[in-house]
Amino acid sequence: MRLLRKLGALSIAFGNIWSWAVILTRVSNNNIETRDFLLSVSVIFATYFFGLFKLLGALKPYHGELVLTHALSPSLGRAVLKSNSERNVYKTYEVKEDRISEDDWKTFKVKLEDYAKSFFEKYYPTVGVDFEFRLLDQKLDNNLNGRHTALYSYFGDHDNYIYLSDWLVHAGIYCDDFSIVVPTLSHELVHYALFKLGKGHRDGQNDFEKELERIGLPSNYNRKFMAIHVFRKEENGKTIAEIYVDKNEQSKPSLGMEKMKGVAYG
C-alpha cells in the first residue's frame, strides 16, 4: 500500500510539472487555446482542488490515545482515573542521555514491528501492518503514553501512525526490557485494528473497551488491568526516570507484564 501511495505521489508530481511546463510554454507563445493547454489547466485545477479537500479533512484527524495519570481534567476530553489508583514503583534510573539515538530507535522499531505482526496474527488475523511507528515527545504532555493517529491521504483511506512516548521507549531500551512498552503498544494496536475493521475504535466505546478486557490491556476508564507509565523528575541536579505500575487492589497484570520481574501483583 505504501509503495502504491509513493508511486501515486510521483505520478501527481510528474503530471503537475508537465502541466505547468505546457501552461508556461503556451502562455509565452500566446497560444492558450490548444487542447494540451486546456488539459494541463484541468490537471492543475483538479489536483489542487482535491488537495484542498483532503487538507480540510485532515484538519480533523482521529486520535486514539492512552493517558495514564491519577486525575485529569474532564475539559481535556480524556479519561479521568480517580480514587484508589496507586503508583507502584517498578524501577528508577538516572537519565544521562535524554534523546534516543537514531540507531537505537531503528533497532527498537524492528522489535515493535515484529511484535505488531505477532499481535495481529493472534488477535486480528485479517488486519495487516500498514502504519508507521513514531516517537512522541512526552515533554509536551507528561500524561500521554501513546497515540494512534489516522490522517486522510491521497491514496488509500488513511495514513496511520502509532506514536509511543519517548520516555517509555527510552526506559525499555535502557532496561533492555521490551515488556515495559507492551501494555501501551498493545493498547494502540487495538485502536488501529478496530479502526481498520470499521468497529468502535475510540476510548470509551463499547467495542474498544470489550477488546481491551478480552486481551487484558489497560483502559483510560478503569484499572481492571495494570498500566505502565514513566515519569521524570529533577533530583539533586540529575534527571531521574521513574517507571511505575498504575493499579488498584483489583487490577490484574496486563498483557506482557508477566515477564516483568519484581512487579507486585497483589
Image: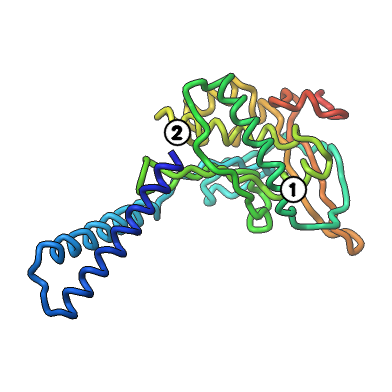
What amino acid type is highlighted by mark number 1? Asp
**Residue for point 45% across, 42% down:** 2
Q: Residue at x 24, y 64 (%)?
A: 19
Residue 94, image x, y percentages: 88, 52
- Residue 104 is labelled as 1
Residue placed most toward the observer, 175 or 61: 175
Vertically, is 21 above or below 134? below
Label 2 sits on what residue type? Phe
Q: Which residue is mark 2?
A: 195
Relative vertical location of residue 212 with respect to residue 156 in this rendering, above or below: above
Q: Residue at x 67, y 32 (%)?
A: 183
Q: Position of residue 45 (x, y in %)?
A: 21, 62
Image position of 258 (left or right of 75): right
Q: Is residue 222 visible?
A: no
For this view, does 148 lie left or right of residue 264?
Answer: left
Does dot 2 land on a helix, a strand or a loop?
Answer: helix
Nearest the camera: 114 or 62? 114
Say which of 133 and 35 sits in front: 35
Decide: is 86 above or below 164: above
Q: Alpha-carbon neighbours of circle 1 within 10 Å: few (<14), some, or many (≥20)? A: few
The span from disc 2 to disc 1 (Cα, nearest Å) is 30 Å
Badge 2 crowding class, 10 Å Cα cut-off, few under 14, some 14 to 19, many 20 or more, is: some
Q: Position of residue 207 (x, y in %)?
A: 47, 25
- Image quarter of residue 36: bottom left
Residue furthest left in the image: 33
Between circles 2 and 1, the one closer to the viewer is 1
- Which residue is drawn at the image coordinates 19% and 80% (left, top)? 28
x and y, in percent, of residue 55 in the image: 35, 56
